[in-house]
Image: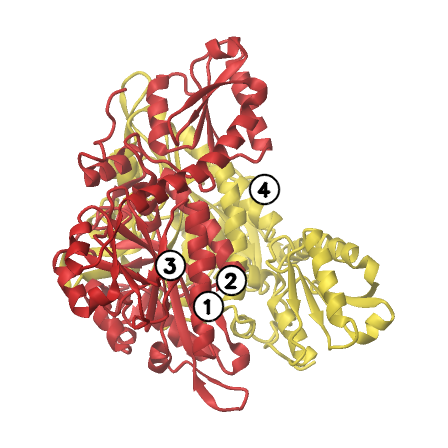
Chain colours: A yellow, B red
Amino acid sequence: MARVLTPRAEDFPRWYQDLIAKAQLADNGPVRGTMVIRPTAYAIWERIQSEMDARIKDAGAENAYFPLFIPESYLTREAEHVEGFSPELAVVTHGGGKQLAEPVVVRPTSETVIGEFMAKWIDSYRDLPLLLNQWANVVRWEMRPRVFLRTSEFLWQEGHTAHATEQDARAYAKKILHEAYEDLMVEVLAMPVLVGRKTDRERFAGATSTYCLEGMMGDGKALQMGTSHELGQNFAKAFDIAFSSQSGARELAWTTSWGTSTRMVGGLIMCHGDDSGLRVPPVLAPIQAHVMIVKGGDGVLEAASKIKEDLRAAGVRVGFDDRVDTPFGRRAVDAELKGYPIRVEVGPRDLAAGNVTVARRFDGSKASVPLAGVVEAVTAALQNDQRALYDQALAHREANTHEVKTLGEAIEASATGWARVPWSAVGVEGEAEANRSAVTVRCLVRPDGSVPESATEPDLVAVLGRSY
Amino acid sequence: MARVLTPRAEDFPRWYQDLIAKAQLADNGPVRGTMVIRPTAYAIWERIQSEMDARIKDAGAENAYFPLFIPESYLTREAEHVEGFSPELAVVTHGGGKQLAEPVVVRPTSETVIGEFMAKWIDSYRDLPLLLNQWANVVRWEMRPRVFLRTSEFLWQEGHTAHATEQDARAYAKKILHEAYEDLMVEVLAMPVLVGRKTDRERFAGATSTYCLEGMMGDGKALQMGTSHELGQNFAKAFDIAFSSQSGARELAWTTSWGTSTRMVGGLIMCHGDDSGLRVPPVLAPIQAHVMIVKGGDGVLEAASKIKEDLRAAGVRVGFDDRVDTPFGRRAVDAELKGYPIRVEVGPRDLAAGNVTVARRFDGSKASVPLAGVVEAVTAALQNDQRALYDQALAHREANTHEVKTLGEAIEASATGWARVPWSAVGVEGEAEANRSAVTVRCLVRPDGSVPESATEPDLVAVLGRSY
């Protein structure tokens, strides 16, 4: 088969670009750094949204929508926040044919505008916790854009909550981290994410604690797949988010925020993709089984249609391709590029013997399956290959994670993967030194793998790597 | 019961504002003309989205996402389009701390940017029809904003399709009009929309035909609930959307666009709302039955919980209110304001007799129902009241639609409702005269009620009215 993509081993970034173009996932937009998400990738994003939305609602948050435009003055109320976001802002100076009295910024994130309304809506402890989420686009001007990973506009969900106590805020930030984010990434995206705590240097602008989920990509680099922040009382002070407590005293609330974005689609591609294209995990896949007619012939269309209906009846999400005027080879390459977990190939020769071919995208294997066994073969393969993708990604991460003792070794190991090193051997100065080699502390974890509540806990392990 | 809202008969616009504030549906955003959609209203919008999305997918369109930012030069390529939208544009002049070489506009609609990509993606007749839809926010600077009805930013879906022939484009614009839009508005929103054709004066900027759906509000005014446009080859010419035909010739495509927005939420409020608040049609309602504990007592919580579970098991979307520390009267008023179709009120006195109270929001009626009959009573009421809301709205429209013969009579009748008048008695000049009295031609329909394909068909009826 002709080479369709630049092999990953030859040039990983080039492979990523090739795949996005050839599988028709996305295009660059006309304004620098923006992207067009094409139907194949958007369908994946819709499935991520729907799975994430259900988990966020299970965690008790309600969806709402806040404006795209934020008065510039809001941003400046929280000092770290404005410092963090100023370089990335898009500013609207004209509206309705006139220069605006006060320029407005296009939201880079919504802590400020949501803080303003939380202050209006919260009166007493009975109004807490206030648990909000929104699905929206945000804009952060990118100097070095890369489709899905760093784009000037991206789609995301951003949750914002207010609580009566610091403990409650912390518990909720972690609930989302584990029950929504980690669960979705592991169970749906089949990605073995590392869950930890950011160092002070890597914290979100305005947060007191940032928890994160890091995925290892095919080239050993890290991608931050999502973050959940405790904001302490920083935004509560800046926007006067206060409540009367049960004793009648006026107290400031404790807030959190948390987000995941279309960047996850980039992570999915770079985690599971291979030299033939994307591999979409079955639980996520908008099309789980793609029924294809190899070429026309007696009863082929009928047999393929029946398989489609049988699979649908069994709860499988099915695609159907009867475009026999396009060569089968080209269509099969396209199906591989798009990463459909299973292809059911129906052709006159197989059919004459009562069989069809079931091809698994996970390992490229093909089996001849009698008609009566197709549903069972497909559902078994879907179940197996979800787990197999996860296991393969985990094995890749383990093979490319190195236990080391010193900062120097950690920086060296980061050339090909991740390094686990005692945080005490790195520290704030070591972190700055690593940064000069384009290596960052991806997160801090406890020796038992759980998530630390502060960077000063004893025996913490720092995980270092290069990143997207 | 104390008066909660300004009565509709006293001041309809004030009633609308009161309702939106008291039912906590939305707030004005900090930037003039923007809005915050609060959870109660956003849940309604999510249900509309999900029902609309399913219909759009059934019509064969696929979702995609195009950038928020459009180069200013794109807008100018189609002359009528730029003229129509220029006064409403928001312009970004600065990004990433620098002045931009070319200002970018925040999309007021996406015909131009999608046209650019259709031109890239379409090669031959095999690529047609290309059927795309996106869910997005758009910005049109509003001088006289009103929440949900006219806001500087709103949420919508915009469909964009390209076809090989004019007939195919027309058929698709009408398919969406009837099978997606009209069906959703009638079956889900319970609104008897009038479906017709816009006059040339009221056409979308850049379209050759605009089809529309008009709803009559409680005060007799019209609200445009959605539009579907044939764009002819206007955008195909401007963006070079061309394809090679089966004979190998290069031909320009025919395109359509169609949209519905959060404005539908405003229409829903003004169509079905009464002096006690919103009334949400059962098929639409995020909460169909709201189970409320009147006050605590032996077995009350257990009985209410069982009713909740039984209703859920019967496929009813259930809300639950056990906040006995808030007076029941206040909670009942809030439930009426929010328009839950059914309230199931569970209190110790009723319960001692083996009963609960089932209250219907449609007509305010209350019935004492034995525990064993609750599920049946609720499901029957839900089914009945969906139809009853539609019938009531239809009766209101018919009572306030006047058959007249002359333009003068039509303008006069428009003071309180709609006027049906022969289009030949109005014409282009009469339309301009009506506009000077703040009366517009809402649409043209055929005598049999069907949708005309041009404004020059004989015997057309013009429907005139005031509008939002």
Report which residue position mark 1 lands on. Answer: B172
The residue mark sitting in front, 1 or 4, is 1
Q: Secondary structure under badge 4? A: loop
Image mark 2: chain: B
Mark seen at residue A449:
4
Q: Measure how far apart labels 4 and 3 are at the Cα level.
A: 69 Å
Can residue A149 be seen here? The reply is: no
Look at the numbered discs 2 and 1 and tell me whether their residues touch, using CB distance below 8 Å. Answer: yes
Q: What residue type is labelled 2?
A: Ala
Q: Distance between the residues labelled 1 and 3?
A: 20 Å
Tell me which amino acid carries mark 3: Gly
Please check whether the numbered discs 2 and 1 fall on a single chain: yes
Mark 1 to mark 4: distance in Å?
56 Å
For mark 3, what is the residue? Answer: B449
Crowd band around label 1 with a 10 angstrom C-alpha radius: few (<14), some (14–19), many (20+)? many
What is the spatial separation of the Cα atoms under label 2 and label 1, in whole angstroms? 9 Å
Label 3 and label 2 in one chain: yes
Say whether mark 3 and mark 4 are on the same chain. no
Looking at the rendered structure, the number of numbered marks drawn on it comes to 4
Q: Position of residue A283 (x, y in %)?
A: 63, 52
Q: Toward the viewer: B66 or A421? A: B66
Of residues B262 and A47, which is closer to you in this image? Answer: B262
Residue A401 lies, with reference to residue B36, above or below; the image says below
Task: Where is residue B208? Give x, y as percent.
Answer: 32, 73
For residue A271, side relative to residue B393 (left or right): right
Query: For mark 2, what is the residue?
Result: B59
Give the mark, 1 or 3, whose residue is nearer the N terminus: 1
Q: Are marks 1 and 3 on the same chain?
A: yes
Provide the secondary structure element on which disc 1 rests: helix
